[in-house]
Image (tube, rainbow, N blue to C red):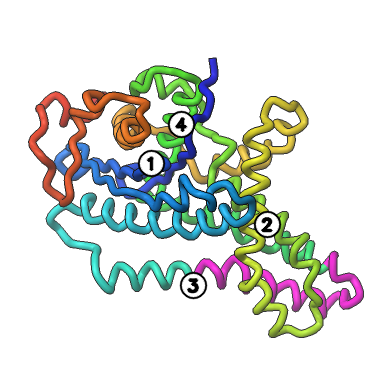
Amino acid sequence: MAKEMKFNYGGQAVMEGVMMRGQRIFAVAVRDPDGKVLVHKDTVPAALYRGRVSKTPFLRGVVGLWDSLGLGMRALLWSADVAVGDEASFTGPLAWGTVAFSLLFGIGLFFVLPAAASAGIESLLGLQDASFLANLIEGGVRLTILIGYISLVGLMPDMRRVFAYHGAEHKTINAYEAGAELTPEVVQQYPIEHPRCGTAFLLIVVFVGVLVFSLVPRGNFIILLLSRVALIPVIAGIAYEVLRWTARNLHRPWVRVLIKPNLALQHLTTRQPDLAMLEVAIAAFKHVLVSEGELDEAEVAQYPVTDGKKPAAVPASAAAPVGQ
């Protein structure tokens, strides 16, 4: 029997691990080069995840997305530091400079470039009096870039492993929501897709963007480009509410049909995980469940929290990767 969602949670794949977030903490579990599972956790802002903001439509999506971006970057940087072991340390100005560059690159690639491309096509085809069609072309360009970018990134061996951890995250959440036992062997049986995935969110952003951008005149090229950046929070807020609504209405057959493209796109950003990867995802999520009062502390005793690269002492049986 499916489990009722008692609290708000989410997750993200990181380097050699998974970050899971609840309403009180986020936990990152990563397998280090020695095969041990290291766990880092920290609190999340109560006002955002348990306060009025979390109950305010549209605002919760924008604020939550921004905070999730920060949490995700912190988790990614910590996982990178653990994954490289003693070889290097991905911290300081280099790390955050890379993050800032990636954010600007993403905005330019997925918002500014499609707008510029559509403006060129608009001029070439004489669509100045057909703004909705021009915005539809822009959405098509954006979707093409999104699919192409994900497909190319997915060819990289390191990213294939990240995508496998993404699959482990989904399987763990699906198993929990089905009320199943959270063990790697049981979790492996569950689907690799999830209706609330961030990949699905990106696809919704593309379609919502067509509608929202249609409200902005396309005459001035500079205003066109600036509007694409300025309206990102508006689009994100609407897309979040759409994603939330579809996830809560999966009992309706037509909604399940509606989200099929969302689930299909996830096959580009997920891979089938092995049992060792599932163990890592389960370890992170169990720490979140403990913080929410869903599990006893004894359930995570074999995955102690560490604040640095070196793990606290753990039993040899707990440190050995599952299935190896």
Residue closest to the far left:
313
Side (left or right) of 29 relative to 13? left
Residue closest to the far right:
129
Q: Is residue 282 visible?
A: no
Residue 29: x and y, percent? 28, 41
- Assign a secondary structure to mark 2: helix
Range of the magenta residues?
A: 104-133
Q: How would you rate the neighbour count of disc 2 (Cα within 10 Å): few for under 14, some for 14-19, many for 20 or more? A: many
Residue closest to the far front:
52
Tag 4 residue: 173
- Assign a secondary structure to mark 1: strand
Q: Amino acid at mark 4?
A: Ile
Q: How would you rate the neighbour count of disc 3 (Cα within 10 Å): few for under 14, some for 14-19, many for 20 or more? A: few
| Earlier sequence position, callout 4 versus callout 2 | 4
Q: Quadrant of residue 17?
A: top left
Tag 2 residue: 206
Q: Residue 66 shows which numbered tag? A: none
- Assign a secondary structure to mark 4: helix
The residues bearing labels 1 and 4 have C-alpha atoms spaced at a distance of 10 Å
The residues bearing labels 3 and 1 have C-alpha atoms spaced at a distance of 25 Å
Point 47% across, 55% down: residue: 153
User: Mark 2–mark 1 contact, CB under 8 Å?
Assistant: no
Q: Residue 20 shows which numbered tag? A: 1
Q: Quadrant of the N terminus?
A: top right
Q: How would you rate the neighbour count of disc 4 (Cα within 10 Å): few for under 14, some for 14-19, many for 20 or more? A: many
| Earlier sequence position, callout 3 versus callout 1 | 1
Q: Amino acid at mark 3?
A: Leu
| Earlier sequence position, callout 4 versus callout 3 | 3
Point 29% across, 48% down: residue: 42
User: Mark 3–mark 1 contact, CB under 8 Å?
Assistant: no
